[in-house]
Image (cartoon, rainbow, N blue to C red):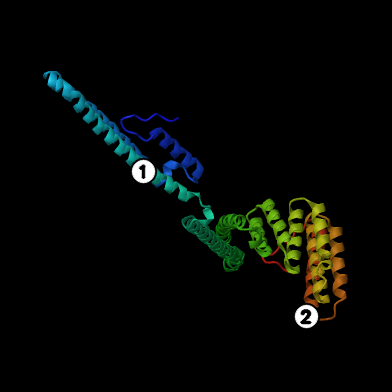
């Protein structure tokens, strides 16, 4: 809305100017709030300062006019005639001050409008915006690279720690065997050493499990899962050992790792009373070369013989002597197909020893303890 200017002095419409300022802000379509734009804040501060000066000047002019009127009221008629001229002069001076201040305010508004007009170009043409975005992308890139590098280093450190623990776990059984021979006549010492070794085994296997669970699945090999299962079995954690054997079977990428995991799983099934599952696993072990056919006849036959003997020992351990002797008989048939050699002679000795143990237990009415799986995957 426009205000009519005074006849004494034409005064620019300040309300119209402020309206034009608002219109300029709308047309600029700033990308950030006005109170975060430095030029906007400076212009507003200048505007407020100008309005304050105008207000103070107006009040000062009014006070001066009032004082002049009081001075002229006590004088004669001649002075009374001259008072309109003084009052008019003071009024003209006050109006001139207002015009000057409004001109200054208009100048500030024009500067603000020009600054806002510079913001209307697209962001992708603003050099400062592009530089800021490039810096942001570079920061993201360096952060990602740093995070990835740290993650790789953490994985390598964890794998190295896991290997060290597993090496120590594999050394404990050897130390027990050496101690049993060194202190053969001292049962108390052997028992005390066995207790200490079992305590150390329990602590280390928990640490190994904690590390293996934190690592990505593809970073823990079948052999490492197998070693953890062996240590869990000696720590009397049979269910945990079965889970580790399952993981070893899943992670196996070669014949040696897979056959060892399958046999060990069958052994644990017999040990925990799950006989049907154990027999199924032994049967799976006998058929391992359907999955890995590219092996020589000796490796295939010797592996099947070892599986038959382990199966027979497990059956004898639960009192199934007839089934146990069937498996030793099957092992004998397999070894008879091999030519005479140091390897085949060793297999014949293993079969004869296993058969003798089973027959002795059968005649005495006892049982044969299952053969525990070794600490390293055999074939």
Residue 141 placed where, x, y %?
53, 60
Q: Secondary structure at mark 1?
A: helix
Report x, y in % for residue 56.
26, 32
Quarter residue 376 falls in: bottom right
Q: Nearer the viewer, residue 129 or 326?
A: 129
Residue at x 13%, y 22% (from the top left corner)? 79
Residue 63 visible within the image: no
Q: Whole-Å distance between the Cαs marked 2 and 1?
A: 106 Å
Q: Which mark is residue 108?
A: 1
Return the residue nearer the eye: 209 or 325: 209
**Figure quadrant of residue 244:** bottom right
Residue 240, placed above or below residue 52: below
Residue 175 point in image, percent of width and height: 58, 66
**Where is residue 316, by image quadrant?**
bottom right
At which x and y percent is residue 72?
Answer: 14, 22
Q: Residue at x 88, y 71 (%)?
A: 333
Residue at image point 18% right, 24% down: 83
Crowding around mark 1 (Cα neighbors within 10 Å: few <14, some 14 to 19, many 20+) is: some
Residue 51 is left or right of residue 88, and the answer is right
Q: Earlier in the sequence, mark 2 or mark 1?
A: 1
What numbered label is drawn on residue 342?
Answer: 2
Q: Nearer the viewer, residue 186 or 327?
A: 327
From this viewpoint, is residue 286 visible?
yes
Q: The C terminus lies in which quarter of the figure?
A: bottom right
């Amino acid at each position: 809305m426009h205000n009519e200017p005074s006849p004494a002095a034409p005064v620019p419409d300040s309300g119209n100017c402020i309206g034009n300022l608002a219109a300029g802000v709308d047309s600029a379509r700033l990308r950030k709030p006005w109170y975060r734009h430095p030029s906007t804040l400076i212009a507003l501060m200048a505007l407020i300062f100008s309005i304050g000066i105008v207000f103070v000047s107006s009040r000062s002019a009014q006070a001066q006019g009032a004082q002049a009127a009081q001075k002229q009221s006590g004088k004669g008629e001649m002075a009374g005639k001259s008072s309109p001229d003084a009052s008019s002069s003071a009024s003209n001076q006050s109006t001139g001050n207002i015009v000057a201040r409004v001109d200054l305010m208009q100048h500030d508004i024009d500067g603000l409008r020009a600054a806002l007009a510079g913001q209307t170009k697209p962001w992708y043409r603003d050099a400062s915006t592009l530089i800021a975005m490039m810096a942001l992308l570079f920061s993201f890139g360096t952060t990602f690279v740093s995070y990835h590098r740290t993650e790789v280093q953490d994985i390598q450190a964890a794998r190295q720690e896991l290997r060290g623990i597993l090496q120590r776990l594999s050394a404990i059984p050897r130390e027990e065997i050496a101690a049993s021979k060194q202190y053969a006549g001292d049962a108390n010492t052997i028992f005390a050493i066995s207790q200490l070794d079992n305590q150390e085994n329990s602590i280390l296997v928990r640490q190994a499990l904690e590390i293996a669970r934190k690592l990505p699945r593809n970073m823990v090999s079948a052999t490492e899962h197998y070693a953890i299962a062996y240590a869990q079995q000696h720590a009397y954690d049979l269910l945990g050992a079965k889970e580790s054997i399952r993981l070893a079977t899943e992670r196996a990428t070669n014949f040696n790792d897979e056959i060892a995991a399958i046999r060990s799983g069958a052994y644990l099934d017999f040990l925990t009373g799950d006989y049907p599952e154990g027999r199924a696993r032994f049967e799976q072990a006998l058929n391992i070369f359907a999955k890995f056919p590219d092996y020589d006849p000796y490796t295939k036959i010797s592996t099947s013989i070892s599986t038959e003997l382990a199966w027979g020992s497990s059956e004898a351990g639960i009192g199934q002597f007839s089934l146990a002797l069937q498996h030793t008989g099957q092992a004998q048939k397999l070894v008879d197909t091999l030519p005479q050699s140091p390897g085949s002679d060793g297999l014949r000795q293993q079969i004869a020893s296993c058969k003798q143990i089973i027959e002795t237990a059968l005649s005495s009415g006892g049982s044969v303890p299952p053969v525990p799986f070794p600490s390293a995957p055999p074939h």
